[in-house]
Image: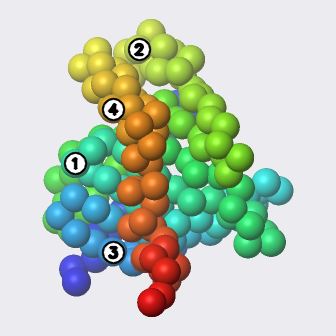
Amino acid sequence: MNIPQLYRRRFIPNELIHLKDDIVLVMEQDLIITKWVTLHPRKDIYRGISAYYLDKGFKISKIYDKDNKIVYWYCDIIQLGKSSENNTVIIEDLLIDVILYEDGTMNIVDLDELCDALDQKVITQSEATHALRTLDHLLKIIYEGQFDLFKVAINVAEGFNPLPAY
């Protein structure tokens, strides 16, 4: 497997971060799964495993605390960035996030950041429209009870078999 160099680009704040410590577990045409530890120490979260669904425009992360308990599932709206370097993948965070808690509650966050990015002209109208359409698609998946299908790839990659043994 030819493992690319992964980068995360954020628009607010404007930064490009090399995810050099992320461990790639799965590398397919439209799916990259990584496991990682937070870049900066935090009290609420410690580590996670993320599935980048490149063809869908979102990243789904299973987030754990220091005690190895699931804190929440975190969904980033993303797009594949352009890179002139071979074997480099840039994932651009389009600001809108969906947080799904184990008790079934959900928060949609950072819509204000999308507005700020548009006002500051750091993203295009087309990118904002893409982010909102992708959010709409993800919410339909969640509301229709299909989100668990996206959890499976993460659970399998981390060695958890969600299917009962017979």
Closer to the N terminus: mark 2 or mark 3? Answer: 3
Name the mark nearer the viewer: 4 or 1: 4
Name the mark nearer the viewer: 3 or 4: 4
Quadrant of residue 145 in the image? Answer: top left
For image coordinates 24% across by 20% down, the residue present is: 126
Q: CA distance from mark 4 to mark 1?
A: 12 Å
- The residue type indicated by label 3 comes to Val
- The residue type indicated by label 4 comes to His
Residue 39 at least partly seen: no
- The residue type indicated by label 1 comes to Asp
For image coordinates 47% across by 87% down, the residue present is: 165
Closer to the N terminus: mark 3 or mark 1? Answer: 3
- Residue beneath disc 4: 137
CB atoms of marks 2 and 3 within 8 Å: no
Q: Secondary structure at mark 4?
A: helix
Local crowd at mark 4 within 10 Å, few (<14), some, or many (≥20)? some
Q: CA distance from mark 1 to mark 2?
A: 24 Å
**In front: 137, or 15?**
137
Name the mark nearer the viewer: 1 or 2: 1
- Residue beneath disc 3: 26
Q: Quadrant of the N terminus?
A: bottom left
Q: CA distance from mark 3 to mark 1?
A: 15 Å
- The answer to whether 110 appears left or right of 3 in the picture is right
- Residue beneath disc 2: 118
